[in-house]
Image (cartoon, grey):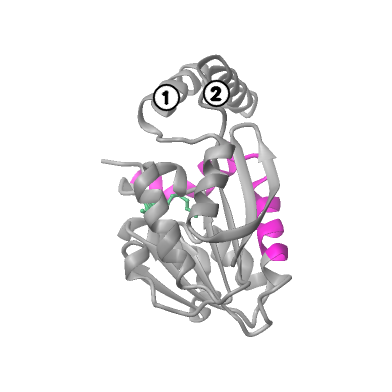
C-alpha cells in the first residue's frame, strides 16, 4: 500500500509533509503570489496532485475569487483534501484521476507541488505537455518537487543533508536513513537542469527558480 492510499498515512499527511518540506507554508504563500501576478481575481486555476488539499486551502484563503480544479489519482488523498478545504470547498471541483482527467480549460494558471518527482521522465514530459495545453498563453505554472544532482557523490551529499534536517526536526535516525535508501531506489528524481529542460520541451518559457530547500526546488514558468 502506498503512502497516498494508506488511511493512517493520509490522516497524518499534513503533519508529515510540513516536517519534510522546508518552509512549506511559505512555499504555498510564494506560489500564491506568483500565480496572482498574472491570474485575474476571478481566474481559474488547475492544481495537479491536489491530494491533501493544503495548497488549495492556502490559495483559496489568499484569493477568494479564484475557482479551482484539483486533480489527483488517490481517492483517500482527495477525501483528505475535502476535509482540509472545509468551508472553501465550494470554490473547488475535485477530479479523481490524472492530467488527462482534468478539464480542458483554458486555465489562467496552474500548480503541481510535491508530485512530479514520482513520475519517470517520459510520463513527466507527457504530463507537462498535457498541462501546458490546458493553459492560456502567458499563464503561470508553479511547480516544486525533489530535484537535485543525480551525480553519485553530489546526490548522496544532498540526500544526507536532507536526512540530517529531518533528524533535527525529530524524525528517528533509522527512519531518516531508510528515507535515503527509499529515495535512491524508488524516486525517479532528476537534476534541476534536467527538470528545466523538460519544462522547455513541454512548451514553457521564462523559467525562474524561486525556491530551494536542500533537495527541493521550485520554479515559476509561463505558457509560451
Ligand atoms: C506528496 S503528495 C503532494 C500533495 C500536494 N500537492 C501537496 O503539496 O501537499 C503527492 C500527490 O501526488 C499524487 N499523484 C501521484 N501521481 C500523480 C500523477 N501522475 N498525477 C497527479 N497526481 C499524482 C498522489 O496521489 C499524492 O496525492
| The image quarter in which residue 147 lies | top right
Above or below, 149 relative to 24: above
Looking at the image, is mark 2 or mark 1 earlier in the sequence? 2
Front-lying residue, 70 or 124: 124
Q: 178 left or right of 209?
A: left
Q: Residue at x 50, y 65 (%)?
A: 47
Q: Which residue is drawn at 68% across and 40% down?
A: 212
Front-lying residue, 184 or 4: 184
Front-lying residue, 139 or 80: 139
Give the residue pinned by disc 1: 184
Toward the left, the furthest residue is 1
Q: Position of residue 58 (x, y in %)?
A: 62, 64
Q: How many labels does the image show?
A: 2
Give the residue pinned by disc 2: 159
Q: Look at the image and say whether residue 24 sits in the magenta stretch.
A: yes
| The image quarter in which residue 182 lies | top left
Is residue 15 something that shows in the picture? no
| The image quarter in which residue 98 lies | bottom left
Q: Do the residues bearing badges 2 and 1 touch, measured as CB atoms within 8 Å? A: yes
Q: 95 left or right of 12?
A: left
Disc number for residue 80: none
Above or below, 30 relative to 37: above
Amino acid at each position: 500500500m502506498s503512502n497516498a492510499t494508506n488511511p493512517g498515512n493520509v490522516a497524518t499527511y499534513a503533519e508529515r509533509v510540513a516536517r519534510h518540506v522546508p518552509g512549506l507554508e511559505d512555499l504555498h504563500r510564494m506560489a500564491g503570489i506568483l500565480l496572482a501576478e498574472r491570474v485575474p481575481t476571478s481566474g481559474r486555476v488547475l492544481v495537479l496532485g491536489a491530494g491533501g488539499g493544503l495548497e488549495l486551502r492556502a490559495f483559496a484563503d489568499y484569493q477568494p475569487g479564484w475557482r479551482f480544479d484539483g486533480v489527483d489519482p488517490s481517492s483517500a488523498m482527495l477525501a483528505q483534501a475535502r476535509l482540509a478545504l472545509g468551508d472553501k470547498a465550494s470554490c473547488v471541483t475535485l477530479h479523481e484521476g490524472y492530467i488527462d482527467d482534468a478539464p480542458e480549460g483554458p486555465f489562467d494558471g496552474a500548480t503541481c507541488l510535491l508530485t512530479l518527482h514520482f513520475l519517470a521522465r517520459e510520463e513527466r514530459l507527457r504530463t507537462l505537455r498535457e498541462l501546458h495545453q490546458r493553459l492560456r498563453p502567458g499563464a503561470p505554472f508553479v511547480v516544486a518537487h525533489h530535484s537535485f544532482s543525480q551525480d553519485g557523490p553530489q546526490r548522496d551529499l544532498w540526500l544526507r543533508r536532507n536526512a540530517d534536517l529531518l533528524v533535527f526536526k525529530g524524525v528517528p535516525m533509522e527512519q531518516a536513513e531508510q528515507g535515503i535508501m527509499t529515495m535512491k531506489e524508488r524516486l525517479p528524481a532528476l537534476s534541476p537542469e534536467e527538470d528545466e529542460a523538460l519544462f522547455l520541451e513541454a512548451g514553457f518559457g521564462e523559467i525562474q527558480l524561486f525556491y530551494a530547500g536542500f533537495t527541493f526546488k521550485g520554479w515559476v514558468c509561463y505558457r509560451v
